[in-house]
Amino acid sequence: MNSLHYVILFSVSKMQGERTMNGIIHILRGKRSAQTIQDISLYSCEQWAALLKNIPILEVNRVIHTLFKVRTLEENRSGGVELTDEGKRKLDYLSKKYQIPNSYEGLKYDWTNVTPFFWEQLALLIQTISYLNERESTFIPVSYSKDVQRAVRDILSANKNYQNLGSQLYAELEKILNDRSDQEAAVFVNKLTSFQRVGRTFEQLSSTFHDDPLYTSIVFRSIIHQMISHSQCHPVDFPVLASLLTKSEEDTMITKTAAVTKTFIEKGFSLNEIAERRNLKASTIEDHMVELAIHDPYFSIDSFLSSQEFTEIREWADKLNTRKMKLIKDKVGDKYSYFQIRLAISSRKGVH
Amino acid sequence: MTNSLLQSLEQQFGFHAFREGQEEIIQSVIQGTDVIAILPTGRGKTLCYHLPAKLLDGLTIVVSPLVSLMEDQVTQMRASGDKRVAHLSSLINDTEKKKVLANLHSYHLIFLSPEMLSLPFIQRTLSKVKVDLFVVDEAHCISQWGHEFRTDYLRLKGVRKQLGNPPCLALTATATKEVEKDICVHLGLKKEVVVRFPVNRENIFMAVESMESIREKEEYFINKIHSVQWPAIVYTGTRQRAMNYAALLSRSGIEKVAFYHGGMTKEDRILVQQQFIRDEIDIICCTNAFGMGINKSNIRSVIHLHLPSTIEQYVQEIGRAGRDGKQSLALLIYCDEDLFLPLSFIETEFPDDDFLKQLMTDESIDGKKVADLKQHFPLNETQWRMVTFYLEKENVVQNGEFQFGTRRKEVLNEMISNFDQRRKEKIYQLDCLKRFVQTDTCYRKNVTVYFNDAMAERPEWCCSSCQSTGQYITWAEKNIDSIHRSLKNKEEKYDWKDTLKKILISKNGDV
């Protein structure tokens, strides 16, 4: 059993048997759909969403297949997946070996494309400085992406003195890596390609992490996440790292189509009017609203639910101890629509 | 003229002399003659169009089927200072593509995938500029007799015509006479110059060893890998085996070993490739995805643990050894079971007859879009492309829609017999390789005969029929330096701060 087994068992254990295996895979692979976005919020999966983004789906399916076969996972009557007793024991055992590092923030940094872009820029910037230090100006760049190359070129031309830039970047990286164990810091440093040496693959770095490339990559990504969040919170203390943060709109957590719906809402159109104007189904627009309720701190659900109604639905959810719409709907009957229930239980905050 | 070419070579690339054949090829294309160049890998193929691209007024277009290789080439050219080079393929996004197309005049060399070149919009844009040279790389893909037939290549003749029939340079590493003929016909070459190099590489010892079983084969491999010269490439038949053999070698004490296959992330592929080029890895276990476009001159051994699908492919792969001209080894370790894998690849490569019959007799399909039907039939992407290409050619598919018409039955039968023919050819090619492997006559001579080359003088170290593999290895151990041979030693103390400082902080003092 390796970390892939661990991640799957762990995520199943968080869903209270109320979601299908496919629903869980979508969360782990970072699918950008309304249902998945809502599930992440409902079951508080923010930390580990998109954890398996880069793992081929065939491999994920193969592991899931074995987990069912050795009876660690089973399907319940309503189609949800649960851990068997054996599964619980396995998970218990694996949690002693593997832990998702605290600084890992899947939804924030991996579900979007923030992490790869930040890392590719950082890696290319470091490679460039290292070659400049050796008075070499031609080399094969670690990133072929034009966007990354352009961003790094901009940073270099904004900092005419690359030697200062190198020293400053060293200080920033050291400050962050000092928080981590030596083995973890070494993973980051060994990933770097420089004049001296080509970066290693996760496979090659896994010996200190149970010979497990996936787990090594999770540790690595958690370091990158730490760098992103530190430089976001303290741009003054981490000027070089902060200059790598993207300002691009593509990286916001809201899907493009939901963002369009939002502009209509801001102009004062109703749900049905928006559906008509955008030539989309009303249910699609509802999906957008739920998505906005989850991710957009300025989005208000007041026009759909009073604070009293909101509280009532939330209370039912707590009483039934479920996040399943159907169970709540059965209790409240025709008083509330599915859409209202979804809004109430997925919204981050209450009604103003 | 010759002098001025040499001058350009010095000015542009800093080389003082052409390698054999380059000058003839470059001279001909600059004069506007069509050329077929059959150059073994590692003989400076890229220069044959890179220099003309710099010298000609108009644009040079290079069609290449290997998208990631194309990207590597562009990156290398740009790294060496030539920024007037770009590529158009699935690897760059639409914005980048548009940017390149809008600024065509600022480039002298553009690489394109055949898929990209078949888009009408790309053709229209290209036909607005002056194209002075049309290069087809891996030109053997145009022939059914070639080892990688690509339907997109059959459209190239039409595209070339649309671009005003610029002179064409067809490049390939290996081509028999049949393939050469196909290249001429399908690209519409006229009065072409053929520059053919013998595929024989006198500095490679060609060894083939037959074993009774897989187990015996593995034992032999593990035994020999420690005594052959490194750096070495070990070719395996599947991704899984590449990984397994790398693990096996690592367990046997070899420290710097890695695997490489097409299923790895792009980042990892770039890293492993660079590590190997920079001698940070001694042995690489890989599928045939590895090797194209790798510029590494000191590879001492190429080992095959599986059967390549054709002699052409085998020759191309062993040709990666010893590009620096020094004595090197090609070792193929064979057992009869190795035939199963390539046979099963052939079996699944083409769409099967029952499916084709179903597709062509189901009335409800008439008028439907090909794209909509894709998920309802168990065909992979390549198979769909073969079928669609065929049906488009016969007008049974028009504008992406099925138009059954009256010739349906006929077309169906033709298609079935066509695929059947191709399947037979592949089996025949595999059989050639099997016979090649099982012979006890000179391997070098057999390759020469296969490609209709004249047999050159036998080198001191020829092959395992003329000498024995054991003899060669013993001799090589004494006489050839193995670059380095690092076995695992105790973990050194690793200080990440030290390493990071060395990378980032300039030795020339803190300014």
Image (cartoon, rainbow, N blue to C red):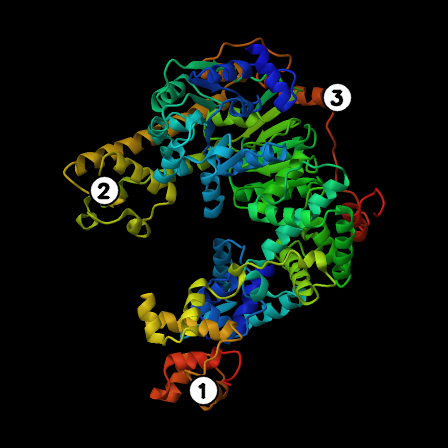
Vertical order, B326 against B484 (above or below):
above
- Mark 2, other Cα within 10 Å: few <14 / some 14–19 / many ≥20: some
Q: For the point 46% across and 32% down, which residue is it?
A: B64
Q: Is residue B426 left or right of residue B318?
A: left
Which chain letter matches label 1? A
User: Looking at the picture, how far across and down is residue A224, in whole percent?
Assistant: 66, 59
- Mark 3, other Cα within 10 Å: few <14 / some 14–19 / many ≥20: few
Please determine if labels 3 and 1 lie on a single subunit.
Answer: no
User: Looking at the picture, how far across and down is residue A218, in whole percent?
Assistant: 63, 59
Q: Are marks 3 and 2 in contact (CB under 8 Å)?
A: no
User: Looking at the picture, how far across and down is residue B438, in whole percent?
Assistant: 49, 23
Q: Residue B357 — which label? A: 2
Residue closest to the far left: B406
Q: Are marks 2 and 1 in contact (CB under 8 Å)?
A: no
According to the picture, the residue beneath numbered tag 3 turns out to be B478
Vertical order, B333 against A110 (above or below):
above
- Mark 1, other Cα within 10 Å: few <14 / some 14–19 / many ≥20: many
Please determine if labels 2 and 1 lie on a single subunit.
Answer: no
| Residue type, mark 3 in image | Lys
